[in-house]
Every structure is written in structure tokens, then in C-alpha cells.
């Protein structure tokens, strides 16, 4: 992936009429832009205290790219690859478009300042023939892989958290549930503007009606997500954490809700359900912020405050 090429951002397509070929071409062009130099003005510059590189993880039936952030040595004689660090498994936002590189600003800061190893999953994107099941398996399988090979990755598996935004927060929420069911103990989950309801009721929330025409998430994108994400013939509630039968015993959650986000009420409702189930949860609302604000520090002044809150929450959870 070329992160320095100067490329133009493609225009938004008609998501209601887009063909498979047009979707693939659009996301390739958009992701090239998100990894380009000009995009840094919007997406933010990485923290110079973190090393960033792509790796491939051998998973069942596939090799998957992950973007790995590690703290650089801070003292003379300190090893370049520190061991026993906390682990944060991150999943980027975007369902049918998106890349881990768009989150360099946040993830490099966490790696350098916690400090921690942050592994960001370049999950399979939603498209005809590639549903949420594939993306969710990618998030879960990467977590299990790094957990099982903790010494090789230089992490302490007993200090692990999951973190995601939007569609990535959906995957992270599903991963937290699978971790509990599998006996894998997480210390924390951070869900930023999470999409947690993929049923037909996903449109019935007041925040959808009020903010669905925002530039970063409009109704055509939501309709395309609903059409593509859930495998045909299956119950969408099985892929919607909001409808999980049991939300008790999960890792403590920080749910970050920008108030001008169409998905704001998804986050609020999920916080209520976690709280009712006895899972510790903190709901942070950012007044005036819109969808995907955490990845737009160049144009969204509230991103810095949210990043600081996430850092403080993870620091308390992972360094105790």
C-alpha cells in the first residue's frame, strides 16, 4: 500500500444504484486516497513516538493484513521491541470502504503514550459475497491469534482490550461477546459511534431521522450496509449486539457518541442494555461532533478530546 502517493479523492457514487464492479472500483480509489500524503491534512499525522508497519497474519484459510503500532524506545539502551506490553486490537470504521491506515493518528498515539501494542485489523470489506460474518471472523481470529502467540508479539495477554469505530465498533462488540463465551478475558472495550442494530429497525431511531444526511454517513450508505452485511436468509438480530440474549459478564465498556451522528441512539441504547445486564459502561457524548469524527482531527476539533478520553480509559484498564 502506497501511503505517500498524491492522489485525488473520488466522488461519492450513487450508493442506491451502485454495481458490484463500481463498488470495488470506488473503494479501491477511496482507500488509495486515505493512505496518501494529502489525506494526512484531514486524518492527522501519526505520533512520532510509534513505529508503524504492515504485517500479515496467517489465519485459517487466509493471510490477513494487520497494521501494527509499537512504541519506540524512550530511553538509551531500551530494546526496540519491548515485551509484556498491553494489547489493543483495533478495527477500523467503514463496512464496504475503509482501511486501517485511516486510523494512524489515534492508534499511533495509543501505542506511544499508553504504551501498548496496537494491532489494527484490515478486515474483509462488505460486498456481494463478503458479508459481516467474514469481517467479524477477521476481528475475532486476529485477537485469538495474537493472544495465542503473545510472547512472539511482545504482549501481555492478560491486559487486552478491543477498540473500534462505527462498523469496526460493531465487530469489536461482537468480538467482546465471543471472547466472554470462549473464556478469553478482556480488560476493556471501546466502541466509538457503534452500529449495533442491523435489523430493519436500524432506521427507527430519532438520531437517524435527525442526522442521516450528514456528509460522513447518509441514508444510501446505511441502506447499502443493510443489504450487504447480513448473510441472505439469516436473522439480522444474530449480527446485532443490541439483541444479544446475554450482555452480562462482558469487559467494561467506553461508548463514545458524537451527538450529530445518525448512529448516536445506537450507542445510547447499547449503553442502556449493557448497564441493565450489569456490565460496567461509561457513555461519553461529544456535543456537536458528527459521524467518524475521531478519524478527522484535521477538520474536527473535538477529536482530540475524544482521543484523550479513550487513552485515559484504556490506561486505567490496561495498566492497573
Image (spheres, grey):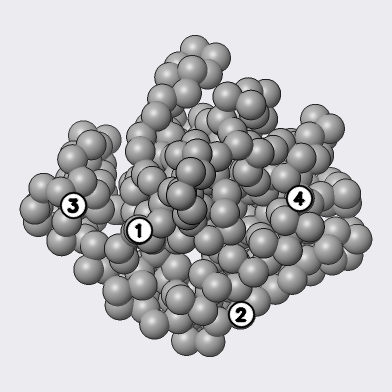
Q: Earlier in the sequence, mark 3 or mark 1?
A: 3
Q: Is the residue 249 above or below the residue 299 in the image? A: above
Q: Position of residue 54 (x, y in %)?
A: 36, 34
Q: Residues within 10 Å of mark 2 (few under 14, many from 20)?
A: some
| Foreground disc of the pair 3, 1 | 1
* Residue 24 visible, this angle: yes
Residue depicted at x 35% and y 38% = 53
Residue depicted at x 51% and y 70% = 307
Could you say whether the residue bearing mark 2 is in a helix, strand or loop? strand
Discs 2, 1 touching: Cβ within 8 Å: no
Quarter-wise, where is residue 269 in the image? Answer: bottom right
Q: Earlier in the sequence, mark 2 or mark 1?
A: 1
| Foreground disc of the pair 4, 1 | 1
Q: Earlier in the sequence, mark 4 or mark 1?
A: 1
Q: CA distance from mark 4 to mark 3?
A: 34 Å
Q: CA distance from mark 2 to mark 1?
A: 29 Å
Could you say whether the residue bearing mark 3 is in a helix, strand or loop? loop
Q: Report whether 18 appears left or right of 122.
A: left
Report the residue marked by disc 4. Answer: 187
Report the residue marked by disc 3. Answer: 36
Q: CA distance from mark 2 to mark 4?
A: 22 Å
Report the residue marked by disc 1. Answer: 48
Q: Nearer the viewer, residue 17 or 198?
A: 198
Report the residue marked by disc 2. Answer: 285
- In which quadrant is the N terminus drawn? top left
Q: Position of residue 93 (x, y in %)?
A: 45, 53
Q: CA distance from mark 3 to mark 1?
A: 18 Å
Residue depicted at x 84% and y 32% = 183
Discs 4, 1 touching: Cβ within 8 Å: no
Could you say whether the residue bearing mark 1 is in a helix, strand or loop? loop
Could you say whether the residue bearing mark 4 is in a helix, strand or loop? loop
Amino acid at each position: 500500500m502506497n501511503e505517500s502517493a498524491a492522489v485525488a479523492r473520488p466522488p461519492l457514487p450513487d450508493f442506491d444504484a451502485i454495481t458490484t464492479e463500481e463498488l470495488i472500483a470506488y473503494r479501491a480509489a477511496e482507500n488509495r486516497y486515505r493512505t496518501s500524503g494529502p489525506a494526512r491534512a484531514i486524518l492527522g499525522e501519526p505520533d512520532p513516538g510509534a513505529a508503524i508497519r504492515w504485517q500479515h497474519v496467517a489465519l485459517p484459510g487466509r493471510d490477513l493484513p494487520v497494521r501494527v503500532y509499537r512504541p519506540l524506545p524512550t530511553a538509551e539502551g531500551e530494546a526496540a521491541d519491548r515485551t509484556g506490553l498491553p494489547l489493543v486490537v483495533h478495527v477500523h470504521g467503514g463496512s464496504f470502504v475503509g482501511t486501517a491506515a485511516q486510523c494512524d493518528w489515534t492508534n499511533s498515539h495509543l501505542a506511544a503514550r499508553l504504551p501498548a501494542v496496537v494491532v489494527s485489523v484490515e478486515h474483509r470489506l462488505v460486498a456481494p459475497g463478503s458479508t459481516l460474518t467474514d469481517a467479524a471472523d477477521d476481528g475475532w481470529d486476529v485477537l485469538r491469534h495474537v493472544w495465542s502467540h503473545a510472547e512472539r508479539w511482545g504482549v501481555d495477554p492478560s491486559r487486552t482490550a478491543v477498540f473500534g469505530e462505527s462498523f469496526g465498533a460493531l465487530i469489536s462488540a461482537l468480538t467482546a461477546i465471543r471472547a466472554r463465551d470462549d473464556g478469553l478475558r478482556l480488560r476493556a472495550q471501546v466502541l466509538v459511534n457503534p452500529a449495533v442494530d442491523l435489523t430493519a429497525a436500524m432506521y427507527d431511531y430519532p438520531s437517524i431521522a435527525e442526522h442521516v444526511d450528514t456528509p460522513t454517513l447518509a441514508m444510501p450508505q446505511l441502506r447499502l450496509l443493510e443489504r450487504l452485511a447480513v448473510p441472505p436468509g439469516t436473522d439480522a438480530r444474530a449480527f446485532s449486539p443490541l439483541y444479544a440474549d446475554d450482555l452480562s459478564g462482558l469487559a467494561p465498556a467506553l461508548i463514545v457518541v458524537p451527538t450529530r451522528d445518525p448512529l448516536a441512539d445506537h450507542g445510547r441504547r447499547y449503553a442502556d442494555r449493557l448497564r441493565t445486564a450489569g456490565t460496567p459502561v461509561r457513555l461519553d457524548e461529544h456535543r456537536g461532533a458528527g459521524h467518524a469524527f475521531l478519524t478527522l482531527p484535521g477538520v474536527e476539533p473535538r477529536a482530540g478530546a475524544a482521543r484523550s478520553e479513550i487513552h485515559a480509559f484504556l490506561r486505567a484498564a490496561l495498566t492497573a
